[in-house]
Image (cartoon, helix red, strand yellow):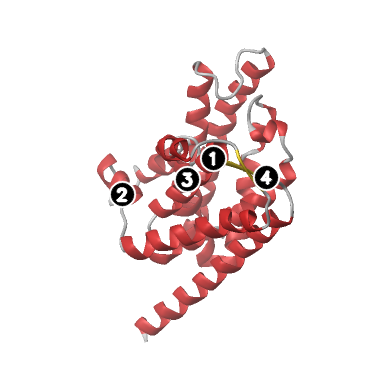
């Protein structure tokens, strides 16, 4: 018998994938016709943003069927709220340092832009990746963790996340179109564990959103990380760090409940 939690997750996945594949599918058509190269500022960018925001759209839609979660006010409060700002933002910074600092130590980083561009475009990246976290970490991850535990749940979530991104391989101008999808998938593994750990701290979604948006802004406008030893060590370090954080949180919660 399928549990109510599983049904919620299945409904979320169906809705998110349908919206994403429909609108990125339209971008693929435009790209094949030579009418859209990401991020051209025409109707294609609107389709792109809708697809990228589909996890958040799916969650908002499903919450409208739950009396205690209905309305835009609840959605915004849940998405943008921080329960322990100092702790959550400190861990966010720590995960960003692990993600980008280690490749720098290995000399696998090339600076491609100015840091002021990173600051300017980080808020923009909320609409080009950041709001995905409302669905993946804010909605899907907790349900998976109840059944499988932190590590397995994060691996399952990441596998789904990798499949969800596949349409980008066929849209001209995206990293996935011109780069190695295998390396992209490996990088998502590190990001999935980092974001899952950030959410697990206090159940807030905003640190995950910021991690995603800032990360996208850095690699788009600040620096390029080569696919080498530094990147691999960074991904492994993110996973290990995330697991340690999850263990400490579990022990702290157990101590408080004893």
Circle 4/circle 1 CB separation < 8 Å: no
The circle drawn on residue 222 is: 1
Q: Name the residue under label 4.
A: 184
Position of 153 relative to 167 (above/below): below
Which residue is pictured at 44% across the width and 63% down the height?
91
Q: Write down the quadrant of residue 2 in the picture.
A: bottom right
Circle 2/circle 4 CB separation < 8 Å: no
Which residue is pictured at 59% across the width and 21% down the height?
26
Q: Distance between the residues labelled 2 and 4?
A: 34 Å
Chain-order first, disc 3 or disc 1: 3
Residue 223 seen in the current view: yes
Q: Name the residue under label 3.
A: 214
Q: Nearer the viewer, mark 2 or mark 3?
A: 3
Chain-order first, disc 1 or disc 2: 2
Q: How far apart are marks 2 and 3 (CA)?
A: 28 Å
Q: Nearer the viewer, mark 3 or mark 4?
A: 3
**For the residue labelled by badge 1, is the local secondary structure a helix, a strand or a loop?**
loop
Q: Judge the density around disc 2: few (<14), some (14-19), many (≥20) Cα neighbours within 10 Å.
A: some
Q: Where is residue 185 in the image (x, y as percent from the top left)?
A: 68, 47
Q: Nearer the viewer, mark 4 or mark 1?
A: 1
- Horizontal side of 141 relative to 60 (left or right) equals right
Farthest bottom residue in view:
258
Q: Mark 2 points at which residue?
A: 69
- Horizontal side of 193 relative to 183 (left or right) equals left
**For the residue labelled by badge 3, is the local secondary structure a helix, a strand or a loop?**
helix
* Viewer-side residue, 136 vs 177: 177
Q: Which of marks 1 and 2 is in front?
A: 1
- Horizontal side of 199 relative to 78 (left or right) equals right
């Amino acid at each position: 018998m399928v549990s109510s939690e599983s049904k919620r997750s299945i409904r979320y996945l169906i809705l998110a994938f349908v919206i994403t594949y429909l609108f990125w599918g339209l971008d693929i058509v435009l790209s094949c016709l030579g009418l859209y190269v990401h991020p051209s500022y025409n109707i294609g960018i609107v389709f792109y943003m809708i697809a990228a925001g589909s996890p958040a759209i799916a969650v908002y839609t499903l919450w409208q069927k739950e009396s205690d979660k209905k309305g835009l006010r609840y959605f915004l409060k849940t998405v943008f709220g921080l329960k322990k700002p100092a702790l959550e933002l400190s861990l966010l910074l720590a995960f960003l340092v692990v993600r980008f600092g280690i490749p720098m130590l290995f000399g696998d980083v090339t600076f491609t832009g100015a840091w002021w561009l990173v600051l300017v475009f980080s808020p923009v990246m909320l609409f080009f990746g950041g709001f995905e976290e409302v669905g993946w970490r804010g909605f899907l991850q907790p349900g998976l963790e109840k059944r499988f535990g932190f590590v397995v749940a994060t691996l399952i979530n990441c596998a789904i996340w990798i499949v969800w991104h596949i349409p980008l391989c066929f849209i001209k101008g995206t990293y996935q179109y011109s780069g190695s999808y295998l390396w992209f998938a490996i990088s998502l593994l590190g990001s999935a564990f980092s974001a899952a750990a950030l959410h697990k701290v206090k159940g807030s979604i905003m640190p995950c959103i910021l991690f995603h948006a800032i990360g996208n802004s850095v690699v788009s406008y600040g620096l390029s990380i080569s696919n080498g030893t530094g990147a691999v060590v960074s991904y492994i370090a993110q996973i290990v760090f995330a697991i340690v954080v999850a263990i400490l949180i579990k022990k702290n919660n157990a101590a408080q409940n004893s």
